[in-house]
Image (cartoon, rainbow, N blue to C red):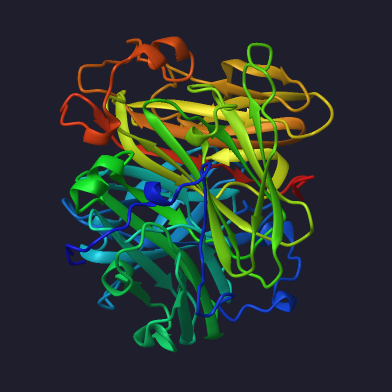
Amino acid sequence: MSRRAVALVVLALLLVGGIVLSRGDGATTAGDVDDSTLVAVEPANLLPVGPPDDALDGAWYCAGQSSGEGTVADGTLVLANVGTDDARARVTATSSDGEEAEVDVDVAALTTERLALADLIEAEWVAAAVHVVGGTITVEHEVVGPLGRDVAPCHSRSSDRWYLPAGASTRDATMALAVFNPHAGAATVDLSFTTDENVREPNELQGMLVPAGGVVVVPVSDLVTEREVMATTVTTRRGLVVVDRIQTFDGTGAATTAEEIEAQPFRRKGVTLTPAVAAPAEAWTFPASVSSNYTAERVVVFNPGERTAEVVIDVALDEQERYDPVPSVPLDVPGGRFAVFDVRDHEAIPSAAAHTLTVRSRNEVPILAERSLSSVGEAPSLGEATSTGSPVEDTAWVLPAGPRPDGADDARYVIDNPGAEAVEVTVSAFGDGTLEALPDGRLTIEAGRRVELRPDDLPPGRVSLLVEASGPVVVERRLLSRTAAEVPGDDEPDEEDDAEAADDETEDTEEGSDDEAAGLGTSATIGIPLDRRLARLG
């Protein structure tokens, strides 16, 4: 993807009370999305879902990554078998140039296997299909590049429609969409991008052919430029596909003039891998949320339909006894438009207080949401982390990937109980053939509360986690690269537990950070539910 020097109207200049609406003045406002197409779908079609315990086979599709040292998002597959039966996976890797290679991977019961795609193909872009026989396998893909690291689930289904609420094409950013067709027939797709001004439909992206078994990577930031926020819609005329977004920020900042530099709230740096979402829903939750001097939290709410969505944003604080309750924030999102909610612009949300953030439509108009956590300035771990949240709850969740074995990451696991009754939870680690509860992994979570676990001593080879609960919960994992000076067991500066210190710290988020000691790479990922009692959020 090429670099561009383009002008920017910084989003901060548009912020009013932390909310920005896309205008759609004088242009298409709904992207040709009729409300009749936004019918309710099964919960299992809303996000990647693991196979049932008695599944005989299954498939996972990993659309977006590169392969090879030094590439922007060098990909590794993480295959975790949480079942009691051994399994075999056939991995087929396909480059954007049409090269193909495959390998069989044996994944014994309760083990986790890693496969670097560069061992199969070295290419600028690669997609992978994982076909499983036996076992209860879930799959994530990890990407690593010069701008950091991210981890995300692969897709468990293909679809004829995909959405991504937020993306950027400012001068410091690149945005690419990987459109993967894992099936035997060719697919034809249309791509559109909702900006703050209009809906862009580049001619070259209408009726775009995606060959059978092929992947096409679209350099969106070369085609739709100068956008701080844009929502993506992918629809097929023929066939089914899967879609991932690969986004980078180089840390130079998006501003181009002295006025913009002065108004620029922070400079983002990092790489993110974000799976697209197949359908909107009425509620989305983000358990592992935080906003502080070091971490800027924003949520983009996209309404792809025709009617206005009457949205409310609720923030449930971790330490509810310490703080006053946060009032609900109403937010109307007209059809075919998006709104941006900046947490740091709302004084009722305490700085450095961990929380669960939930976005709901009060009038049954389905929406989509995407949260970004931008760790900047003097943060101990720099990076950009994005998540489209969870529209579902379940009693069992798997997180295949975990902290790297050399102690390079700080891992945080948040379990949220959105229900009206307390739940009993067991958190177990696996990966080396055994399943064992963590020392602090048996706990009770009261109704409407969340618990955060930070296991410091996961055994080598046993970093995959299984979360089982007596009632529905939602699970999110954060991975933060440690500073270069840290070793396992050292105390890391804590943005969430040391709010007073964070508030007193003098730091300049406008200037970014040139401190080579800071870890580079953050990730925030909803776990993979196992469809034991899968249901939409209540």
Picture coordinates of residue 70, whole percent (x, y) = 16, 51
Question: Compared to 347, does 194 lie above or below?
Answer: below
Pick the residue in front: 458 or 252: 252
Q: Residue at x 48, y 43 (%)?
A: 298
Furthest-right residue in this view: 421
Residue 326 showing in the rendered view:
yes
Q: Which of these two is toward me, 410 or 271?
A: 271
Looking at the image, how many numbered discs can be counted on the residues? 0
Left or right: where 14 falls relative to 307: left
Query: On screen, 407 above or below 372?
Result: above
Which residue is at a point 38% across and 49% down the rendered structure image?
A: 13
Going by the image, does 529 lie left or right of 61?
right
Left or right: residue 446 compared with residue 194: right
Question: Of 418 and 409, which appears nearest the observer?
Answer: 418
Q: In the picture provided, is 181 more to the left or to the right than 451? A: left
Q: Residue furthest front?
A: 259
Where in the figure is residue 299, as x and y percent of width and height? 52, 46
- The residue at 46%/87% (across/down) is 186
Give the quarter of the figure containing the C terminus.
top right
* Depicted 280 relative to depicted 191: above or below: above
Which x, y percent locates residue 245? 40, 60
Q: Considering the image in quadrants, where does the N terminus appear?
A: bottom left
Q: Is residue 13 above or below residue 1?
A: above
Residue 100: image location, x then y, percent: 30, 73
* Residue 53 shows in the view: no
* Residue sitting at x 84%, y 30%: 420
Q: Quadrant of residue 373?
A: top left
